[in-house]
Amino acid sequence: MELVKTKILTKTAASVVIFAAICVMAALSGPHRTADIETAPWYSIIPPLMTIMLAFLTRNIILSIVVAITIGGLLTTLPSDQTSLMAILAGLKTTVFYPIETLTNIEYLKILAFVPPIFAMVEIVIVSGGFKAILQKLLPLIKTQKSAQAATALMGLVYFIDDYSNAVIVGSSMRPVTDRFGISREKLAFLVDATSAPITSLAVISTWIVYEVSLFTVTAQKLGIEKDGYSMFFDALTFRFYCILMLSFVLGHILFGCDFGPMKKAQDKAQKNPPVNSDITAPTKNTEDKPPARMLNALIPLAGLVLFHISGLWIDGGGPAKITTFSSIFHWQYWREVVGSTENSILILIYAALFSLTLAVLCAYFSGSLRIPDLIKCIISGTKKCFLPCLILISAWSLKSCCDSLNTDRFLTNLLTGNVPPLIFPAIVFLVASLTSFATGTSWGTMAIIIPTAVPIAFALDGHTYGLTTTITLGAVLDGAIFGDHCSPISDTTVISSIASRCDHIQHVRTQLPYSLFIAILALFCCYIPAGLGLAPLLSITIAITVMVIVFLTLPRLSRKNTLP
């Protein structure tokens, strides 16, 4: 107990010292011109900095943001009249105004409207047994340890809609299979964790996409970038080095059968003493009357979601008018232009989610998998699960409004422009986002904190144009948030992966950490820094994968040499 108290006091003291030091440096090195001081004061960095510090101490991103925007509201009035009670009351009134402004913003409300139907659809697909049926079809094809790992990774890649349900479905469904082939629970947890957030974040249709696009859209509007949030998302895809390399690593290390570090020890132990599945296998009541699970319960709603969304973007973006030849519709540039011309992307997502939910209800009902009361329960349950993500969205948007009122982005732009080389700025952003995500345990919260501050700086470093530094920075923020989330023991996705895989949580973090660090180092030195210097992203990824393959080929030989007498 005393040791725990000592650690908490040490962490708190260190955080306070760092916070104070950054504030002092900001005050001393900030803009010296009177106009700049008035429009972008040094204390404008306190709300986002306070969010990071409190999130590190409390592990509660929402509480941290609430405290930060309260301080931000007071900072809008107190500096001009520190002793006035009216200034304090005005500052508190401003604090209350931030979430009110968020909840009265039509665009924000559209984004929030997308979340409940997609979560409800996911709940119905799970409960109706659609994914269970897909798994039953896969089982006869699994005959070796490699194929068991490959099937696990494939399930993670196929289910790209949501990272939480991805981890739950893949972990719990594949656990009996991996146990049968002597695959450690640590390896299962890694495969689940490494294919959940990365594929969901990269997917053009997921529970993440609307959040990522909304952050880009708001930032673009503020900076005057004539780009739609979707278009910016597609631009950043080629610079999502960590996610791309992590998915490549998952497939490559299965193919080469190469494990290292604590994971290798866990695998060796599992080979000698295979994990035992402790699930209760007793049959449930009325199993004879319950129809078998059907793949169509999952395939039809998911296909409907994808097709409706793509068709809607195609029509709204003027796709038919942009067809020059039949082959043009198969070109990537054609779809970038179509998606970039879309004006109602959020509405299309809402309609696609409602359409998919309708298909899920119809499939589950007419297949006999769920009755109407069960469907209502699923919809209510799915809607409840979206409460926390929506609360994070509202809090993040409120923090953004707070930073906007204090001109945080302008202060940081003035501070860093001319002092940070544009070539390495995306790499710095990747590191900052990684540390923030590791400290907070949330990738969404990290995106909300970093994007509104980092992208304006990159835009200024590009000479106030939408250039290479800005585009790479978009990818660096998203990837850094996911890397830190992978390493963090307090990450919700990491915890869910451990629970679904029945793996000791600390063991999961210990065994996954070397793999995540290895991929992050490759992304940083083989991709982000070279890409900032102008190297083509495809060539950067090729170099990183080449290094990865060399490691896969070299490590087993080194391991055999070390074991020889």
Image (cartoon, grey):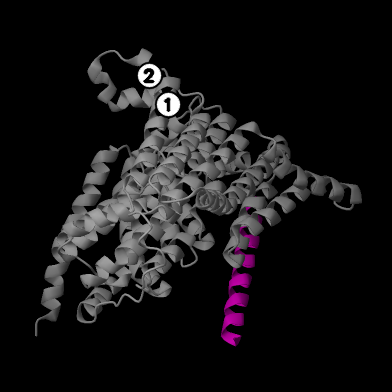
Residue at position x 63%, y 42% from top? 411
Q: Position of residue 9 (x, y in %)?
A: 63, 76
Q: Vertical placement of 39 versus 5: above or below?
A: above
Magenta stretch, main secondary structure, is: helix
Q: Is residue 517 visible?
A: no
Q: Calculate the distance from the C-alpha at mark 2 to the C-alpha at mark 1.
A: 8 Å
The mark found on residue 392 in the picture is none
Residue at position x 32%, y 49% from top? 294
Amino acid type, mark 2? Gly
> Mark 1 = which residue?
313
Q: Give the residue furthest to the left.
A: 565
Q: Position of residue 565 (x, y in %)?
A: 9, 85
Q: Quadrant of residue 184?
A: bottom left
Amino acid type, mark 1? Leu
Image check: 70 left or right of 472? right
525 and 451: which is toward the camera: 451
Residue at position x 30%, y 53% from top? 133
Residue at position x 44%, y 63% from top? 496
Label 2 crowding class (10 Å Cα cut-off): few <14, some 14-19, many 20+?
Answer: many
Image check: 34 left or right of 377? right
- Mark 2 or mark 1: whose residue is earlier in sequence: 1
4 magenta-colored: yes
> Mark 2 = which residue?
319
